[in-house]
Amino acid sequence: MQIYNKLKNPLVSGTLLLTASGVLGKIIGFFYRIFLSRAIGAEGLGIYQLIFPISTICFAVTVSGLGTALSKYIAEYQERDPSSPKRFLKICILLSGTLSLGIMLLLFRYAGFIAENILLEPRCAPLIPILACSVPLASVHSCIHGYYYGKKKAAVPAVSSFMEQLVRVIFVFLVYRIRSEQGRPIDASVAVLGLVFGEAGAFLLCITALLFSKEETALSGGYKVAHPARKLLSYSVPLSMNRLALTLFASFESILIPSRLCLFGYSQSDALSIYGVLTGMALSIVMFPTVFTNSVSVMLLPAISEADSRHDAKKISRTIYQTIFICLMLGSLCTVGFLATGKWIGDFLFCNALAGKFIRMLSFICPFLFLSSILSSIMHGLGMPGYPFLLNLLGCLIRTFFVYFLIPLYGIRAYLMGMLLSQTLTALLSAWILWKKRLQ
């Protein structure tokens, strides 16, 4: 009975749903990365990975801050005003949709300029207009995810995230089979087109779920949230600007890696291959366990926000302590696991010894990666978005320093050391800030 009651807790059940969906999606994605590495090669994978900074910048501008604000305010106001969730959602979709359409048109117009002058790789030019088509789809379904997270209902986001991954993989695999029969290889453009189809699948599922939902929208208790658009914008604009700044730093860091590797002595082709092995193979494996911590982070934000609005300091303190313990335990287990299996994963699954070497070197960031992610979510829920921004900015600056100044001297090892240092510092400072502000 005690286990059953715990499973009824929205935080626990939502985390389990998101984790289950994430694990299935990661497993599919894991084999998809192996398939892509063999279908388009390490260099093709590097070119494909180069466009993701553009994708993350688009997400930061169009929906990241709005989605977080939507979850926060729905969690705060839904009990007092049952009609507020739908009103917040409509405003969020309108704002995010308008921004995403503008961004899409800019990407169509300046694809060549972005590829040559920002990504420093002209072969990315035909990929950017394809990626642009996914921006409005991703923005709308991310808003709907924020709506359900705020209501502590994770089923629709969990299923749609899995659907996105599944549709993407099926599409690319079918195109690969058709072209193989015709004797034509696939390239990175097919993988990017797969992103668009995946986002379309998630979009259709979210819209369908929303249209057929039977949730109460009538007012009760005589309370009505005033100026919902102003509330969303006042919270989301600073948050979006913070995330955009961080995303720009992170994107600058990613784009620099191949060019700095060339200064170390690699050819452009070899530099892109190493970048593809690192980001498309090794990091995809090391990030696999973050499916659990990401799920916890998403569900923690509205739960902590609600506890803070009720001034439940005991619940907040207990959550912080439990979070630190679980993250350190899970992260340590992952470090040991990757150290033991990294070489086998690289040699057997990716047929790339360098991937195995990277996995073993990156394994040490796991405890700090998990900890910083969840503690950042707790600080957002407590209305402290400035601290995660400053800490993440510090991490970006450290990695950028290692990329710009040390990769030309020591190669890709310098970047791996920069990642370890930045994640360690971010996690320890996050814990210290929460200790000083909320636990003392």
Image (cartoon, rainbow, N blue to C red):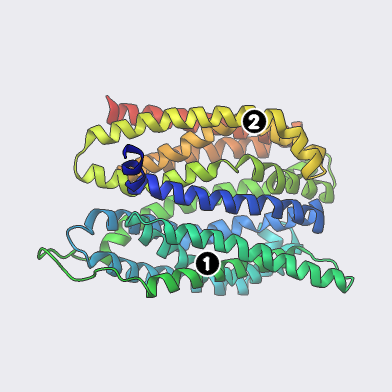
Residue at position x 39%, y 52% from top?
239
Relative to 357, say whether 228 is above or below. below
What element does badge 1 sit on?
A: helix
Residue at mark 1: 202
Among the two numbered marks 2 and 1 on one chain, the one whose residue lies closer to the N terminus: 1
Q: Amino acid at mark 1?
A: Ala
In percent of width and height, residue 40 lies at 80, 58
In percent of width and height, residue 427 lies at 47, 31
Residue at mark 2: 337
- Left or right for 112, reference 292: right
Residue at position x 65%, y 54% from top?
28
Asked if one can make out residue 97 in the rendered structure from this viewpoint, the answer is: no
In what quadrant of the picture does the N terminus appear?
top left
Residue at position x 38%, y 39% from top?
387
Task: Choose top left, top right, bottom left or bottom right for residue 439.
Answer: top left
In percent of width and height, residue 50 lies at 68, 55
Along the line of sight, the residue nearer the viewer: 263 or 426: 426
Relative to 391, say whether 336 is above or below. above
What element does badge 2 sit on?
A: helix
